[in-house]
Image (tube, grey):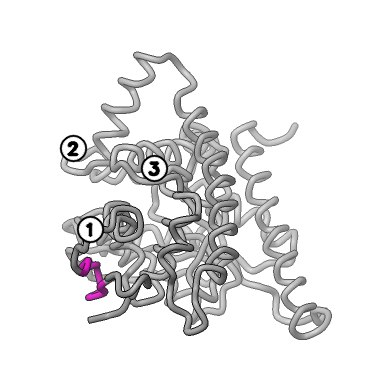
Amino acid sequence: MGPHPAVAAIRLAVRRVLHDVLTDLTDRHADHHGPAVAGGTPPLVLVACSGGADSMALASALAFEAPKLGIRAGGITVDHGLQAGSDLRAAEVVTRMTALRLDPVESVAVRVGRDGGPEAAARDARYAALDEAADRLGAAAVLLGHTRDDQAETVLLGLARGSGIRSLSGMAEVSGGPGRSHRYRRPFLQIDRQTARKACMVQSLPVWDDPHNIDPAYTRSRLRHEGLPALEKALGKGVVEALARTAQLSRDDADALDSWAAEAENGVRDEDGRLECAKLYALPPAVRRRVLRRAVVAAGSPAGSLFARHIEEVDRLITGWRGQGAINLPGRVEAQRQGGRLVIRQG
């Protein structure tokens, strides 16, 4: 008799991702060093585990599947220090991961700032800690337990902010920063939250329900417990699946437009590399705004602080020119129109 369907589902999802990790490693070795050397140190894959049902299900599946593929499996839990006894909770998660025979296993304490609000600040601190741990341990990938439900919430949050199609594309199955574009993997984006919880229950895995997840002070918590249920009541079941599907379709469109913008950028600069307003004006708006965003980020504006309204203001220097002055942007970057050219620089 095989495993419970929920357990089979999470294991299959993780197995597929681990195969992808191995394929990427082989391709990189072939591109830069020739064929991967057999008998070398097995690659390490980490799971980011909070102790909740999603990440505990992910940790259990990684522990089961990794050894069969010759992969070392480890775990990291991040102590945000936002609740009394958080250090004890992190130590308990370490114990649970160790019981699954993950190795290495670490708890990393972080200090959460205030930029962007509590949720964004905690996320920034968490990813910084995961990046540091992955670099230090030489991990080939870090698995994250985001589910289809998390994806649906992310799409709705982007919609509520009036963001563009990139925001509606939600979380990518594979992501990472510069030089780490394939670091983070999300095996569960096609798996619902209930399946992960069921997998923990049938395996007798203890889970911890973070009180922040039901705290109405947090936007995502209100959306999870009030917004989505209201939508399902009004529109019927299937809202989560439809939103997750929207995320994938939006991501495909956003990727295509980003590629178009990258190609178009060289054609709208003069011989000195300055952006020409007339050539920018001729581009389709969706492509032009992407070219502008790329230029603003390249000038030093933090991508995470750059919103659609900022780019719309810069765009008006092209489409609604009435002699207006410089536009101030995040990161002390300013954009202004001078002699038919768009000048973007840090001031």
Distance between mark 2 and mark 1 Cα atoms: 45 Å
Eye-nearest disc, 1 or 3: 1
Label placed on residue 154: 3
Q: Which amino acid is tagged 3?
A: Thr
Is 327 magenta? The answer is yes
> Residue shown at 39%/58% (left/top)?
93
Element under disc 2? loop
Between 41 and 117, the residue placed more toward the observer is 117
Structural crowding at the residue carrying mark 1, measured as other residues with C-alpha within 10 Å and reported as few (<14), some (14–19) or many (≥20): few
Is 158 a magenta residue? no
- Label 3: which secondary element: helix
Of residues 30 and 67, the one drawn nearer to the viewer in this rendering: 30
- Residue 24 in sight: yes
Measuring from the top left, give residue 189's x and y in whole percent: 54, 43
Classify residue 70 by image quadrant: bottom right
Q: Which residues are magenta?
A: 326-334
